[in-house]
Amino acid sequence: MTDSVISTRGLTKRFGSFTAVDRVDLEVPAGARYGFLGPNGSGKTTTVRMLLGLVYATQGSIEVLGRPVPKQLRQVLPRVGALVEGPGAYPHLSAAANLMLLDAAAPWADPKPRRAGRDRRRRVHEALETVGLAGVGRRPVKAFSLGMRQRLGIAAALVRTPELLVLDEPTNGLDPQGIIEMRELMTRLNENGTTVFLSSHVLAEVEALCTQVGIMDHGRLVAQEPLDALRRPTGRVLVELDDATAAKTVFNGQVAAAEGRRLVVEGLPVAEVTRRLVDAGLPVHEAVAERRTLEDVVLSLTGPGSDRVA
Amino acid sequence: MIGVELLKLVRRPRTWVSVLLLCLLPTIVAVFLSVSRIAPRPGEGPAFLSAVLSNGQLYPAAALGIVLPIFLPVSVAVVAGDSVAGEATTGTLRYLLVRAVGRTRLLVAKLAAVIVYTVLAVVAVALTGYVVGVNLFGSNPEALTYATSTVSGTPLTTADLLQRTVLMVAYIGWSMLGVAAVSLFLSTLTDSSLGAALGGLAVLVGSTVLVTLDAAGSVRDWLPTRYWLAWVDLFRDPILWHDIQRGVLVQGFYIVVLLGAAWANFATRDITS
């Protein structure tokens, strides 16, 4: 229990008669890269907002960094960096001025209360450098591109070198290079001990970055497992050969599908499948154990997003 | 946190543009008056405007009288209405709160910034009024004893006039704080700063309409704008305190209730902006 960075029990949020989050038990181990997946409207953002004390839970308990939320938010939040539903900034101010103002707003949480001003300038500068905005100068944020704003939002989350990063859709508006850059940044931060909690509906992003996955659907947490466990082999073997139908006879009743050059065999290891085919004189071009992709897992567990109104 | 809010206030171009505009209107009026030398007859037009031609030192009072009905409340309502809702619109409200700024503390800091703005605006208008008045209408010290008179007709010394002007600035500032409290409360209810500002103004217009309506006489003394013009009594001899005291109490009541409601709402609300 103690090595959980985020832990919720029966977390529920109702807006009127609508249940946005329904009895969710999150468990995010320290040092993990946790991917929080789910279709639009599945309750991801509401959950994130509850973790940060923006939205109050109807029922259930939350612990972040070992302390109850929202009761001890003041102790918890200075150790957390967050990006929630897109960046926010004062449009008429520069990137550095924005970060300085935001950081100065809670001076009791300063890591170094003495010489706070100088320390703040240094931290802001470092954060801007980390996200690749060091050269942006005095340009006001209203002149920023979507990607630059997103980088500024990530910089704001990093200013206090948090132990826990909560990022909601962090790659919105970034180009492919930017996405890779951010992925490398998060991996690097994670290797230095930061737990990353990443909420996203972009499966590829989670698949490429995360070690743990939680999947939400209609307010419920329908799966929570290490990524490798979710993508375990399905027990089926995919084979490519010259004539699939001819190979059917080799396996009695264990063939799930045979069409053209593709054969799907169930319930046998790859080595056994290839051995039998070769013994039967059928050359095998390729044979692999089928793994479920994250997409398969998610699609099998979740219904359509609630933005689809049919 | 209060320092940060003040910094935001002074860095915002809107603050200075609105104060400048507030000072501009009395200046324009003064220029017309000094060029044409046609003052409104006593009892017509904004208070004191009839008397300023003979002494410019009364112009601060006249200037505040000019901006009090609309311009001053509009600018205060805009700033107060924007305070929380504006942060919600730019998306910075959630980041301030996530940065461990407590909700109560944030609201107090916002209130402090609104108070500073209100005082700034009122004092700026009064000072502009003084500078413009003395320069355009003169303050002949000899004429002063004869010309500077209270509404009741007795003469006022410069020191006396100054003291009463300071009281007037304080009273008008307090009345504006009532406006600010309405808009600040609405600002915690909605994410639209325009809505909060207009809502505050709607309350004022409604109150102004009811004040003039005899049928609403039973509630008149409790309407927020009922005693707004009572500051004129500061320039009577002796000062007529009754309405001013009532005005301070009524505004105080609204300020306490509305700020309490703003706090209760903001501290328990789900931030979904």
Image (cartoon, grey):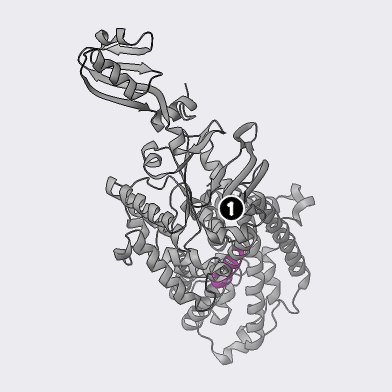
**In x, y percent, where is residue A145?**
32, 52
Q: Give the side of residue B75 with respect to residue A180, left or right.
A: right
Q: Quadrant of residue B142?
A: bottom right
Indicate the chain on which mark 1 is placed. Answer: B
Q: Would residue B90 be visible to someone looking at this image?
A: yes
The span picked out in magenta is B111-122
**In x, y percent, where is residue B77?**
57, 58
- Considering every residue shown, the one lying at the far front of the view is A279
Q: Residues within 10 Å of mark 1 (few under 14, many from 20)?
A: many
Which residue lies under the disc numbered 1? B187
Amino acid type, mark 1:
Ser
Report the number of discs.
Answer: 1
Residue drawn at (41%, 33%) of the image:
A294
- Tell me the element at label 1: helix
Q: Quadrant of residue A208?
A: top left
Residue drawn at (57%, 58%) of the image:
A77
Q: Give the side of residue A198 with respect to residue A180, left or right.
A: right
Q: Magenta stretch: dominant SS?
A: helix
Q: Quadrant of residue A279?
A: top left
